[in-house]
Image: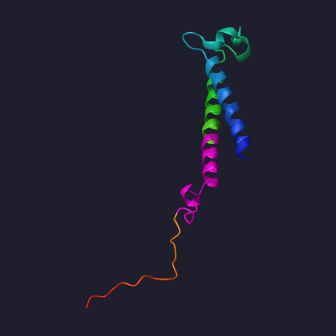
Amino acid sequence: MTSTLLIVQFVLAILITITVLLQKSASMGLGAYSGSNETMFGAKGPANFLVKITFVLGTLFVVNTVTLGYLYNETRQQSVVDTINTNSLIPAVPTTTNTPTVPTAK
């Protein structure tokens, strides 16, 4: 599931980049290379269409990002510290069978 959403994330990022570059700006962006856009999208050109597509793609990108974050967080409920075996970190205390006697004061 997460791998599919990750692939969708990459595709959405590429599509958003393309639609932003196709929008009309002061330097015309990549829209200058598309020829006569006005005949395909009407008298105003692709401005309204590209703005709507960019908005939809941006919304899908944000929803997909939040979903990916939620799914990755679900799989990582444990901390790395919780998986450390503490028994191997504490040195073993040597046990002796004969205990030394402590002299008592008289």
Q: Residue at x 56, y 14 (%)?
A: 25
Q: Would you say residue 99 sits in the magenta stretch?
A: no
The image quarter in which residue 66 lies? top right
Q: Quadrant of residue 59?
A: top right
- Residue nearest the viewer, comparing 49 with 95: 95
Point 64% across, 17% down: residue? 22
Question: Residue 77: percent from the left, percent from the top?
Answer: 59, 57
Give the vertical position of 34 relative to 51 (above or below).
above
- Residue at image coords 33%, 86%: 103
Q: Is residue 53 visible?
A: no
Q: Residue furthest bottom?
A: 106
Point out the image quarter for the C terminus: bottom left
Residue in front for this viewpoint, 104 or 27: 104
- Residue 92 position, x and y percent, is 53, 69
Q: Is residue 90 left or right of residue 62?
A: left
83 vs 35, left or right, is left
Position of residue 9 measured from the top left corner of the image (x, y, whole percent): 67, 36
Residue 68 drawn in magenta:
yes
